[in-house]
Amino acid sequence: MTQDWDEVSFVISSNYRVAVLQRLAEGPATPSQVAEDADISISHVSRALGRLQERELVELLVSEDRRKGRVYGITDDGTAIWETIEAENLL
C-alpha cells in the first residue's frame, strides 16, 4: 500500500478530523450520530466532514439534495489512511 503522508498529516493535524474518520471507520453515520458518538459539537463535525470530503476520504452516501438524514461513509482512500494512522500509532 502506498502511504500518502500528506493525507495522514492532514487528518492527524485535527482532533475533529481524527474523531470523524475514526467513527466512520466503524460504519456509515449521520453527522449528529458522529457528534454524539465522538462527543464533539455538530459544527465541528460538519466542518471536519467537509474537509475530509474535499480530500475524498469520506463520501456522502445519499443524494446531495438531502438536508436532513445525510449519511456519510469512509472511502477506500479514507480506510487506507485510517489503517496507516492506527498501524503507525499516530494518535
Image (cartoon, rainbow, N blue to C red):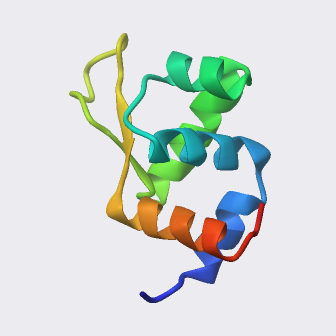
Q: At x 63% / y 77%, what residue is drawn?
A: 6
Is residue 40 left or right of 35 when viewed as pictured?
right
Q: Quadrant of the N terminus?
A: bottom left
Residue 71, located in which quarter of the rendered image?
A: top left
Residue at the outermost top position: 68
Residue at the outermost bottom position: 2
> Which is more toward the observer, 22 or 48?
22
Q: Quadrant of the C terminus?
A: bottom right
Is residue 61 left or right of 55 when viewed as pictured?
left
Is residue 40 left or right of 23 when viewed as pictured?
right
The x and y percentages for residue 38 are: 67, 29
Up-down relation of residue 17 to residue 90 (above or below): above
Up-down relation of residue 16 to residue 65 (above or below): below
Residue 88, located in which quarter of the rendered image?
A: bottom right
Q: At x 35% / y 55%, what residue is drawn?
A: 75
> Which is more toward the observer, 29 or 47?
29
Q: At x 37% / y 10%, what residue is drawn?
A: 68
Is residue 52 left or right of 36 when viewed as pictured?
left
> Which is more toward the observer, 27 or 21?
27
Residue at the outermost left position: 63
The x and y percentages for residue 24 are: 47, 41
Up-down relation of residue 77 to residue 20 (above or below): below
